[in-house]
Image: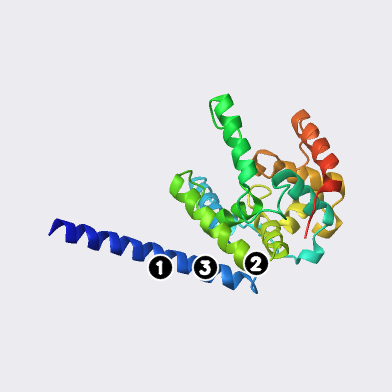
């Protein structure tokens, strides 16, 4: 009796997991021809900003707006494409969603330091998280992220993956996508970003809300210099 119940529970759980994966796959297939108006990450950030506004006695609907404007791949500066690949995922054109070499290096580095000091998320994994998942850190979330990354790589071109990522990445408090980032930080369109501006945007990607418009630090300057050196050899689709 108990074995039968356990078996039924396992089957129900497996069926639920399968339904979830089919839903994710359907969303990924939709993205092949459609541009998302928002993402799970954008929705979470908007909710957070509205909650803060309410606590400050403001009308959340009037006080809070996300800065986001979709631009096609051709209207994004090659400088930004190269800078982001150089900073975030140098083997973007070579891997299938997960960079196993980078994962191995990160594990070795973390073991040597005795704590987590390096990650190995590819652009595809970051896109999967931004589009569909929360920012929580758990093995379950990482596993789902890897599955979605595989779906993205299996169904979309590298050009489309990079186009999506550059249009939904966060580049400041409530600032999403290359066009909004270029306008917010430098007062230019995404197509007009020069090499240094692009390198700065790539450097702040891991913690975009820490850096206000026009702010620089010795660390940022060092990282920008490194990315500028890497950009000419960065391969983009």
Residue in the picture at 50% in, 49% down: 142
Residue 230 quadrant: top right
Front residue (pair 62, 11): 11
Task: Kindly report the distance in space between the C-alpha atoms of the residues bearing marks 3 and 2.
Answer: 11 Å
Q: Earlier in the sequence, mark 1 or mark 3?
A: 1
**Looking at the picture, does residue 38 appear above or below residue 106?**
below
Query: Which disc number belongs to residue 25?
Result: 3
* Location of the N terminus (image quadrant): bottom left
Q: Residue at x 57, y 35 (%)?
A: 107
Q: Is residue 22 left or right of residue 234?
A: left
Q: Nearer the viewer, residue 124 or 172?
A: 124
Query: Label 2 to label 1, Cα distance in Å?
Result: 21 Å
Number of marks in the rendered image: 3
Q: Position of residue 219 (x, y in %)?
A: 75, 30
Q: Considering only vertical position in the picture, is 179 above or below 197? A: below
* Image quadrant assignment for residue 179: bottom right
Kindly give the residue lying farthest to the top in the view shown. Answer: 113
- Residue at label 1? 19
What is the spatial separation of the Cα atoms under label 1 and label 3, in whole angstroms?
A: 10 Å
Going by the image, does 96 lie left or right of 213? left
| Label 3: which secondary element | helix
Let me know if residue 46 appears in the view: no
> Tell me, what colour scheme is on the image?
rainbow
**What mark, if any, has residue 156 been given in the picture?**
2
Say if mark 3 contacts mark 2, CB within 8 Å: no
Q: Position of residue 134 (x, y in %)?
A: 50, 52
| Residue lying furthest left | 1
119 or 74, nearer to the observer: 119
């Amino acid at each position: 009796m108990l074995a039968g119940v356990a078996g039924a529970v396992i089957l129900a759980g497996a069926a639920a997991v399968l339904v979830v994966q089919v839903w994710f796959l359907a969303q990924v297939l939709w993205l092949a021809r459609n541009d998302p108006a928002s993402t799970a990450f954008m929705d979470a950030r908007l909710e957070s900003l509205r909650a803060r506004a309410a606590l400050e006695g403001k009308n959340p609907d009037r006080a809070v707006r996300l800065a986001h404007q979709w631009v096609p791949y051709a209207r994004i500066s090659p400088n930004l494409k190269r800078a982001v690949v150089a900073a975030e995922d140098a083997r973007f054109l070579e891997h299938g969603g997960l960079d196993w070499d980078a994962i191995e290096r990160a594990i070795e580095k973390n073991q040597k330091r005795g704590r987590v000091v390096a990650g190995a998320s590819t652009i595809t994994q970051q896109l999967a998280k931004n589009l569909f998942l929360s920012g929580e850190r758990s093995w379950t979330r990482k596993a789902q992220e890897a599955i979605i990354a595989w779906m993205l790589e299996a169904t979309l071109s590298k050009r489309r993956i990079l186009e999506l990522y550059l249009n939904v990445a966060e580049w400041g408090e409530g600032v999403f996508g290359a066009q909004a980032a270029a306008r917010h930080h430098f007062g230019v369109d995404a197509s007009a970003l020069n090499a240094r501006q692009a390198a700065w945007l790539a450097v702040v990607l891991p913690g975009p809300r820490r850096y206000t418009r026009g702010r620089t630090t010795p660390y940022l300057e060092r990282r920008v210099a490194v990315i500028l050196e890497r950009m000419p050899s960065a391969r983009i689709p």
